Each structure stands twice: as C-alpha cells, then as structure tokens.
Amino acid sequence: MVAKQPQDNQLIKTTSSLSIASVLFALLVVILLFSVSQFSLTVLPIRQILLEGKFQYSDPHQLQHVLDQSAKSGLFALDLREIKTELLQFPWIKSVEIERIWPDRLRVYITEKNPYLRLGDDKIVSVDGTAFSPGSTQKFSDLPLFDLHNRQFTPELFKAYREIEYLLAQNGYELRQFHINEQGIWSLDLANDIRITIGRHNPLTVFKRFVVIWPNIGYERINTLKSVDLRYENGFALEYTEHGNQRK
C-alpha cells in the first residue's frame, strides 16, 4: 500500500492541473468573446443603414428607428434574426431581407403586403390570402368586402372567393361584396347592384352551374336585373326592377 502512494499523488496533481487548465481555457474564451464584441462595436461600427423598398402603407421613420437602435451593437454583433422578427411585427411588412456590407454598412430590403380585400370592419386580406389588422381600414373602402359574420377566415374560403371573383370577371361582372350570414348562406353583391343569393348547400358547385347558363338568360335585360336566387333545387329565380319575379 505504501508503494502505491506516489502514483496516487501524481494522479491528484494531474487532475488538479487539468482543472486549472479548464478554468483558464474558459476564462480565455470569455475574454476572447468580450474582445470580439468590443472590436465589432468600436472598430466596426455601423455607419450607414440602407433601408430600401416601396413604402405605401408603412412608416419608414418607424422602421428606421428600429434599425438605428439595433445598429448600436456593431456590424458583426448584430442579431439579424432578431431584427427581422421585430420588423415583421409591423402589420404591413410581408418580408425582410438583411445584408451586412463590409466594412460598415447594413442593407435592409422591405416588401410590403399588397391589399386585396377587406375582411369585416377591421381587417385586410393581402393578395396571398394573409389576413391582418392594419389599424384602420377607412382608406380601403374601395376594396371588395368579404363579410363572414364572425366566422373564421380560412384558406378554403379565400380560394372560393378568388374562384367566384374570376368566374364573374369572365362574364363581365365585378364582385363588390361577398357575405356569409349567421345561417351559412352565401350571397354576392355585384358592382352593377345585382344581388346573387347562392345558399348554403354546396354553394360553390351551385354557383358554377349557374355561371354556365347565365349568358343565355341575363344579357338582354341585364340593366333591369335586380337579384338572382339560386336556392331552388331544380332552378333559380330572377327578379327585375320593372317586373315581378320570373321563375326559370
């Protein structure tokens, strides 16, 4: 047992040396990271921020303020993901591209959402089907209205809207309002004041079937057509401004 004591002492000394080396290495890493951050901040400060994009709905001054605050950390200490996330919080921002440009510039390219229609009283839907709250929709009163009566807006409903709008345009009509009421009944208001009530049972199929035969029944008296009711199992009803209901 006495003969093994030097080996035990040597093991303790080796372990102690490794522990000290680990501490020194960790300390060196901390010092190095601190030095790099200070180098980035003092030696490579951001001197110019290039904010690019077409700003129709966003305030570029607000965006610039966010960038100015982030730029205080220096060119290489910037957290680009964090900056992008913060900019995307602005309601009209669709995408953000950020690029470091050596030695002291930052380029930020902003793409805004393109408004397509109004969703209820307080939201806008972009051309790609994204619904968002812009703060105010008053200046977008010329956009078509999609009124769901507190129903959830879904990609399927947006696809149906686009398809109905396209079919109407193919026949020379402009969709101004699309309603789905509390009972789930679909109805359309056209730009020429025609109301089309589709119903709630397979509404898209019903409307497609009607569009096929519409050119044969409506063109001659289109100026006097007031409404179309498609809620009949084997037909539909046309109402004119000068005559009573006519069943087809």
Image (cartoon, helix red, strand yellow):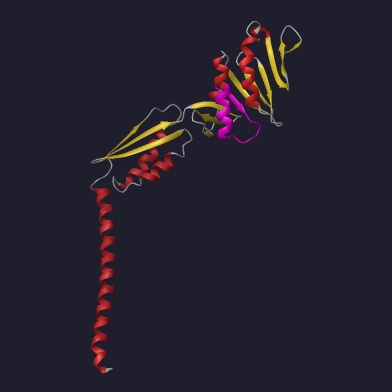
Residue appearing at x 39%, y 33% in the figure: 110
Residue 203 lies within the magenta run = no
Residue 162 coordinates in the image, percent (x, y)? 55, 25
Residue appearing at x 71%, y 17% in the figure: 236
Residue appearing at x 69%, y 31% in the figure: 184
View extreme (right): residue = 244
Question: Which quadrant holds the N terminus?
Answer: bottom left
User: In the rendered view, does 164 fall on the left or right side of 187?
Assistant: left
Residue 152 coordinates in the image, percent (x, y)? 61, 36
Q: How many marks?
A: 0
Residue 17 coordinates in the image, percent (x, y)? 25, 76
**Relative to 177, is 105 above or below?**
below
Which residue is nearer to you in this view: 218 or 50? 218
Which residue is nearer to you in this view: 202 or 100? 202
Residue appearing at x 67%, y 18% in the figure: 195
Question: Which quadrant holds the C terminus?
Answer: top right
Image quadrant in which you'd find residue 205: top right
View extreme (front): residue = 234
Which stretch appears magenta? Answer: 142-164
Residue 89 coordinates in the image, percent (x, y)? 46, 40
User: In the rendered view, does 71 fall on the left or right side of 140?
Assistant: left
View extreme (bottom): residue = 2
User: In the rendered view, does 137 fall on the left or right side of 196?
Assistant: left
Residue 150 lies within the magenta run = yes
Image quadrant in which you'd find residue 62: top left
**Relative to 226, is 91 above or below?**
below
User: In the rendered view, does 117 fall on the left or right side of 229?
Assistant: left
